Amino acid sequence: MSERILYQFPISHYCEKTRWQLDHKGLSYRTVNLVPVAHRLRTRWLARTNTVPVLCDGRRRVGDSTRIAYYLEKYYPEPSLLPRASDERARVIELEQQFDYYGAHVRRWAYGHLLDRPEVQELLVGDCDLPGPMTRLAGPVVSEVIRRGYAINPGSVMRSEQQLEAALVLLENTLHKGDGRYLVGGRFSLADIAAASMLAPLVSPRGSPWDLFEEGSLPSALQARIEGWRARPAGEWLLARYAEDR
């Protein structure tokens, strides 16, 4: 059997979206962690893309978490994450696209507050098979390129935080219209994976890639914001999906 490889950043919520889908379908794979910025040399060669994740499934190579999602639904349809009913299927696709959009704002907000913390630095470059001295040098360089590439500054981080409220309201309104557990049709779907993985960095579910920080180590204002998100219906749902479905 051909090997299945996921090229990724461990901390990326877009990569988490793909890992979750692979795990849900029971598909074996191994991960290869790439160094941010330098990753483009590999991803361009593999799948003509500048981003991760990239999935190599035997001879097939697919980049972008959404393209990977539909590739997996095509070639590994069971258990399905797309409803058969056309209206429900369309709603899942719509929500997946919406939460993917909000994921970029989650990323900017999270990096804006946490990029320079050693726990984040370790996840960015610490498990990429770099020699020790190079790892220490790469961390600050990668952080600076991320800061510039994602336009991380006080103004943009504040604007992204406003978008996070819209994302949480979308999640809560969707839950209110449904059964309160799953977003579409009363069953687990790609919409749930997209929403949970994109928004999970806001509440750091236990056992998730963002469960990084010792209790009380974050600034009090930031900790209060996270606790506030955890206490609202959207936050409770995010924690429940990781506890029950991840």
Image (cartoon, rainbow, N blue to C red):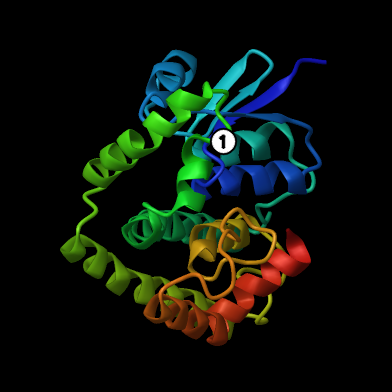
Closer to us: 145 or 53? 145
Q: Residue 25 at what x, y percent from top left?
A: 77, 44
Which amino acid type is marked by label 1? Ile
Tell me: 128 left or right of 219.
right
Tell me: 211 left or right of 34.
right
Q: Residue 215 at what x, y percent from top left?
A: 59, 73
Closer to us: 85 or 73? 73
Q: Residue 125 at what x, y percent from top left?
A: 48, 35
- Residue that appears at 77% across and 68% down: 244
The residue wearing badge 1 is 68
* 122 is higher (above) or lower (below) than 129: below
Q: Quadrant of residue 89?
A: bottom right
Q: Residue 63 at what x, y percent from top left?
A: 49, 29
- Residue that appears at 52% across and 34% down: 53
- Residue that appears at 56% across and 20% down: 61
Judge the density around disc 1: few (<14), some (14-19), many (≥20) Cα neighbours within 10 Å.
many
Residue 210 in sight here: yes
Closer to us: 35 or 195? 35
Tell me: 194 left or right of 114.
right
Q: Quadrant of the C terminus?
A: bottom right
* 6 is higher (above) or lower (below) than 91: above
Query: Judging from the image, what secondary structure is the residue with disc 1 in?
Result: helix
| Residue farthest toward the front in the current orientation of the protein | 133
- Residue that appears at 61% across and 62% down: 192
Q: Quadrant of residue 177?
A: bottom right
Residue 36 in sight here: no
